[in-house]
Amino acid sequence: MTSSGNPPRNFTAIDTWVFDLDNTLYPHHVNLWQQVDVRIRDFVAAYLDIPAEDAFRIQKDYYRRYGTTMRGMMTEHGVRADDYLAYVHEIDHSPLEPNPAMGDAIAALPGRKLILTNGSTAHAAKVLARLGIEHHFEAVFDIVAAQLEPKPAPQTYQRFLDLHGVDPSRAAMFEDLARNLAVPHQLGMTTVLVVPDGSKEVVREDWELEGRDAAHVDFVTDDLAGFLAGVSAAK
C-alpha cells in the first residue's frame, strides 16, 4: 500500500468498496479505452459533419469541461444519450483477459462491492465478464442511473449513495482519475488512485495522469489486486 503523502484515512471500518470500471479494474496499458476514444471522435465527426481532427478537439474539450464528451454533445448539440452510448461502446473487448488474482482480492474484502462508472451497464457487463469478476459485484451504477450527469458532478455521487444506501464514512472509492475522487473524499470516503504501471506504455492525456499528490487522494497504487490483498491482510 502506498500513501499519497497526505495523512491517509484507513480501511478499518470500511464495509462498502466502490470501484470505477475503465482503467481501474483492468490495467491502463490494455488501452481498451483507446477504442472507445476513436469511436467517440467518429461519432462527433459524423454528427457535426466536420473533419476528424476538428472532432477530436471538440471531443477532448467537452470531456474535460463536462466530465464526458457525451454530456457536452447533449448540452451543446442535443445528442440522444442512447444513440451515443450504443455507438461508442461497440468495441472489441477481447484484449481483456480473466484476472483470477483480482477476483480473489475483491472476494476477500469484507462487505459490499459496487461499480460506479461513467460508462453504460452493457459495457460494464462485458468488461466484468471478460475479467471473470462479475459475480463479485452487487450492482453497477452507470451513466443512466446517474441521470446522464457524469462524475465528478457532486449530485451523481449523492444519487449513488442514496440509491444503494451507502454510508460514505464506511466506504472506499477506487478511481483512475484524481479529479473524480475529490467529492468522494469530501463526503468522507477513503480514496485510492489507481495509476498506470510505469513500465508499460499507456495512451492517456497528460491531465488524466495528474493529481496523485492531491489532498483528496489517500492512497496511490499501480497494482490494484496487490493493493486489495494488502488491505485484506491488514484488516
Image (tube, helix red, strand yellow):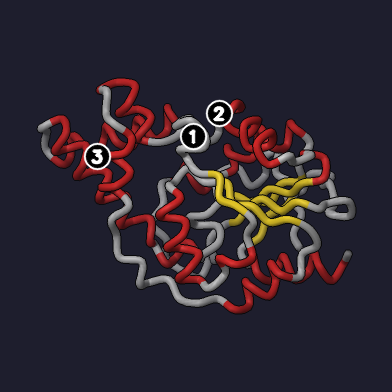
**Percent position of residue 188, x then y:** 79, 36
Q: Number of callouts in the render?
A: 3
Q: Which residue is mark 2?
A: 153
Q: Residue furthest top?
A: 76
Q: Nearer the viewer, residue 58 or 198?
A: 58
Q: Which residue is mark 1?
A: 150
Quarter of the view holding residue 61? top left
Q: Which residue is mark 3?
A: 56
Q: Evaluate if marks 3 and 2 touch, with contact meaning CB atoms under 8 Å apart.
A: no
Q: Evaluate if marks 1 and 3 touch, with contact meaning CB atoms under 8 Å apart.
A: no
**Percent position of residue 57, x then y:** 26, 35
Local crowd at mark 1 within 10 Å, few (<14), some, or many (≥20)? many
Residue under the point 17% across and 40% down: 53
Q: Evaluate if marks 2 and 1 touch, with contact meaning CB atoms under 8 Å apart.
A: yes
The amino acid type of the residue labelled 3 equals Phe
Q: Nearer the viewer, residue 208 or 126?
A: 126
Quarter of the view holding residue 179? top right
**SS class of the residue under badge 1?**
loop
Residue under the point 58% across and 39% down: 180
How far, Cα to Cα, is label 3 from label 2? 23 Å
**SS class of the residue under badge 2?**
loop
Q: Quadrant of the N terminus?
A: bottom right
Q: Label for residue 72?
A: none
For marks 1 and 3, give the one nearer the viewer: 1
Local crowd at mark 3 within 10 Å, few (<14), some, or many (≥20)? some
The amino acid type of the residue labelled 1 equals Pro
**Percent position of residue 40, x then y:** 27, 44
Q: Nearer the viewer, residue 29 or 129?
A: 129
**Percent position of residue 66, x then y:** 43, 28
Task: State which tag comes first along the sequence, 1 or 3.
Answer: 3
